[in-house]
Image (tube, helix red, strand yellow):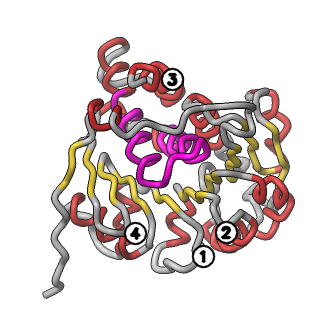
Amino acid sequence: MRERRTAAAAERVTPELLRTWPLPEPTGSKRSRGQVVVVGGALRSPGAALLAGRAALRVGAGRLTLAVGASVAGPMAVALPESGVVPLPETSSGSVRGTGVRAAAGDLGAADAVLLGPGLDDATETARMIPRVARAVGHDTVLVLDAFALGALAGHPRLAGDVPRILTPNTEEASRLLGRDADDLDADTVELARRYRATVSCFGRVASPDGRLLTVGDGDPGLGTSGSGDALAGAITGLAARGADPLQAAAWGTFLHAVSGDALAGSVGRLGYLASEIVDRLTVELDALS
């Protein structure tokens, strides 16, 4: 019978806890507030990268670049004029080529935080992309892995090198990373953090590689909507770019995502609010904690 580690005693994330753990103060220019690069946006799902990028800006990141498939780069630049755009080469089916990420090498090298995964749709190409991105970023750049990047990482914890990293799996992706069903999210989130040497945010749980566990809760049911995970990953990335360490960025981002859902459940309805509305609510909830 497989022996499982027990989870560390969980700490509840509350507004009071976060106020004693303040985010770095924003100062100076947009570059000093943090540069974010989102790598994703294949032909069939460009909106994921768009949502994530907007979320990063909504939590105060200063500069955003979207590295997306060449076929959608132009429309993305129009849809989000606050962002720079780098077109990436695509396969014949519209997936982003893993080797094509070198087109964004300069932006990746200058980034404070990089989010890899939203809108990618080819596991093989994504697996080729992860180590190339990890080599292109600076030693202190925080690398956030989401969506297809998590599937490519599963079973290969060294694929992303040694840069600081955050994983944002949903429960299905957590099971893939574990190689079994995730049936105890407290213990399983801690196990993922240790196994992949990463901070992990999974369904309201946040764990660090040293075993610390923070809980936000399962969140409002309406958070289970298309694009919600992209909003979460983008918020965490934006906070990391501002200078928050991985655990702080994940804890704050996960909390802001959850309370944004709670607020929308009250003003819109428990079901039916959109991920774009979650993104726009982040700024209000962040301001409420200041």
Judge by depth and name the residue closer to the eye, 182 or 192: 192
Eye-nearest disc, 4 or 1: 1
Residue under numbered circle 4: 176
Is disc 4 placed on a helix, strand or loop?
helix
User: Does 282 appear above or below 121?
Assistant: above
**Mark 1 belongs to which amino acid?**
Gly
**Residue, x 37% and y 59% (percent of image)?**
172
**Of the image marks 1 and 2, the number of the one nearer the N terminus:** 2
**Of the image marks 3 and 1, the number of the one nearer the N terminus:** 1
**Of the image marks 4 and 3, the number of the one nearer the N terminus:** 4
User: Does 231 appear above or below 80?
Assistant: below
Judge by depth and name the residue closer to the eye, 107 or 73: 107
3D distance between C-alphas at marks 4 and 2:
21 Å
Q: Quadrant of the C terminus?
A: top left
3D distance between C-alphas at marks 3 and 1:
33 Å
Residue 20 x, y percent position in the rendering:
33, 36
Residue under numbered circle 2: 134
Residue 263 x, y percent position in the rendering:
34, 19
Q: Quadrant of the N terminus?
A: bottom left
Residues drawn in magenta: 230-259
3D distance between C-alphas at marks 2 and 3:
30 Å
Q: Residues within 10 Å of mark 3 (few under 14, many from 20)?
A: some
Question: Which mark is drawn over residue 283?
Answer: 3
**Mark 4 belongs to which amino acid?**
Arg
Eye-nearest disc, 4 or 3: 3
**Mark 3 belongs to which amino acid?**
Thr
Is disc 3 placed on a helix, strand or loop?
helix
Question: Which mark is drawn over residue 161?
Answer: 1
3D distance between C-alphas at marks 1 and 2:
6 Å
**Residue, x 53% and y 39% (percent of image)?**
24
Residue 89 x, y percent position in the rendering:
84, 59
